[in-house]
């Protein structure tokens, strides 16, 4: 079953080479679903892209790590001497170079 894609600005051509085995398996899977290879490839590509983007947009913590995170937000430790020195150095650089938007 082939579904013709409308030709308009919402579509773009993607051209790539795949192994014969991958092509054959994709065609077989598309046939099982009653899809064209184009429709199957588009759906598979969209699904994989969304999975990768989702994994890179979220931070997943265990319950223990989330509890530790919340605890550190609600009850932060006082700044260390090293952090105070770094902040003082930053403030000094910022005052010396206002054009840098530090």
Image: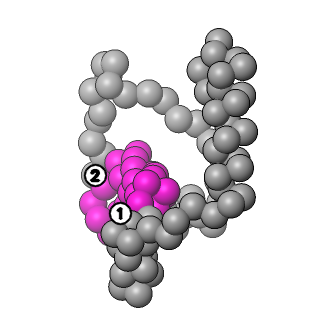
Q: CA distance from mark 2 to mark 1?
A: 8 Å
Q: Which mark is residue 31?
A: 1
Q: Can you give x and y, in whole percent of width and height, for residue 79 in the image?
A: 57, 61
Q: Position of residue 16 (x, y in %)?
A: 62, 42
In the rendered image, the vertical position of residue 8 relative to residue 36, given as above or below: above
Region in magenta: 29-58
* Residue 65 image position (x, y, % from top left): 44, 81
Q: Residue at x 28, y 52 (%)?
A: 1
Q: Quadrant of the C terminus?
A: top right
Nearest the camera: 32 or 57?
Answer: 57
* Residue 50 magenta-highlighted: yes
Q: Say whether residue 57 is left or right of residue 6.
A: right
Q: Which residue is mark 2?
A: 1
Q: Residue furthest top?
A: 99
Q: State the SS at label 1.
A: helix
Q: Which residue extends farthest bottom? A: 64
Using residue 88 as the reference point, say whether residue 43 is left or right of it: left
Q: Nearer the viewer, residue 51 or 26?
A: 51
Mark 1 surroundings: few (<14), some (14-19) or many (≥20) residues within 10 A: some
Q: Above or below — where is 11 with respect to 89?
A: above
**Label 2 environment density (alpha carbons within 10 Å; few <14, some 14–19, many ≥20):** few
Vertical position of residue 50 compared to residue 92: above or below: below
Task: Tell me if label 2 and label 1 are in contact, CB under 8 Å.
Answer: no
> In the rendered image, is residue 37 in sight?
no
């Amino acid at each position: 079953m082939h579904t013709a894609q409308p030709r308009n600005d919402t579509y773009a051509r993607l051209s790539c080479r795949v192994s014969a085995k991958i092509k054959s398996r994709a065609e077989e899977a598309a046939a099982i679903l009653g899809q064209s290879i184009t429709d199957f490839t588009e759906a598979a590509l969209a699904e994989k892209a969304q999975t990768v983007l989702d994994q890179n947009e979220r931070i997943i913590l265990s319950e223990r790590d989330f509890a530790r995170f919340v605890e550190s937000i609600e009850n932060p430790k006082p700044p260390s001497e090293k952090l105070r020195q770094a902040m003082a150095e930053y403030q000094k650089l910022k005052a010396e170079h206002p054009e840098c938007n530090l």
